[in-house]
Amino acid sequence: MQLMTAARDVFAVRGTEATIAEIAASAGLGKGTVFRHFANKDELVAAIVDEMIDDLVAKTENLLRADDPAEGLRGFMTAGIELQVHNQAFCDVAAGAAVREHPVLKPKIARLESAVEALVTRARDAGAVRADITGQDVMLLLTGIYQTAAPALPDSPDIWRRYLALTFDGLQPTAARPLPQPAPGG
């Protein structure tokens, strides 16, 4: 469907700030056609991001079966940051855009969080990450890594990999000092 293709493309570049008018124009349609399919922009954003979350959940659940728990966690973190780098709408949702509370997205995000918690627990149990790291910590770190790299991405599109490596090193249990605050929700 040309509407969904246009919406994916426009949201990837402009994020959740994209307008229905921009999407309709990109699809060669009128705004009314968009609204016949989606009651409002949040419904359209949810439909697009829903697919991305489903894909990330599937990857995460597959990574739970990785031979090396640390590599499973690193694989998830890599996939999560790559999504943010290549799709501004996903980035906006990861950073807390209001559409995150959409009834379609909310249970999918909860499923993703549960899978990430399982990845982190597996890595903790294997001694691959520090004992005080939670899935919520990892989810928040993904946005932080992306935001750290974002200003340099136009000139160095893979710079985020540097900050992921630094962060992953910081998750290691070797010489870890106690964290000054508990994890969010912990």
Image (tube, rainbow, N blue to C red):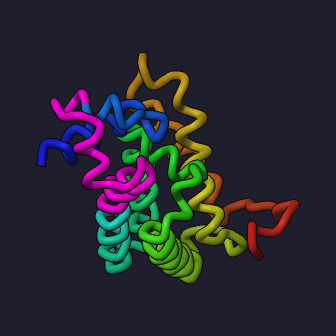
* Residue 78 placement (x, y as % from top left): 41, 52
Report the front residue among 73 and 50. 50
91 relative position to 28: left or right: right
Report the front residue among 172 and 153. 153
Residue 161 in view: no
In this view, the residue farthest toward the top is 155
Res 25 quadrant in image: top left
Residue 66 in view: yes
83 relative position to 134: left or right: left
* Residue 22 placement (x, y as % from top left): 33, 29
Image vertical order of residue 24 relative to residue 174, above or below:
above
Image vertical order of residue 167 relative to residue 68, above or below:
above
In this view, the residue farthest toward the right is 180
Report the front residue among 19 and 39. 39
* Magenta-colored stretch includes residue 130: no
* Residue 26 placement (x, y as % from top left): 22, 29
The residue lying at 13 percent from left, 42 percent from top is: 2
The residue lying at 35 percent from left, 52 percent from top is: 44
Residue span colored magenta: 25-52
Q: Quadrant of the C terminus?
A: bottom right
* Magenta-colored stretch includes residue 28: yes
67 relative position to 25: left or right: right
* Residue 144 placement (x, y as % from top left): 61, 45
Decide whether the magenta segment is chiefly helix, strand or loop: helix
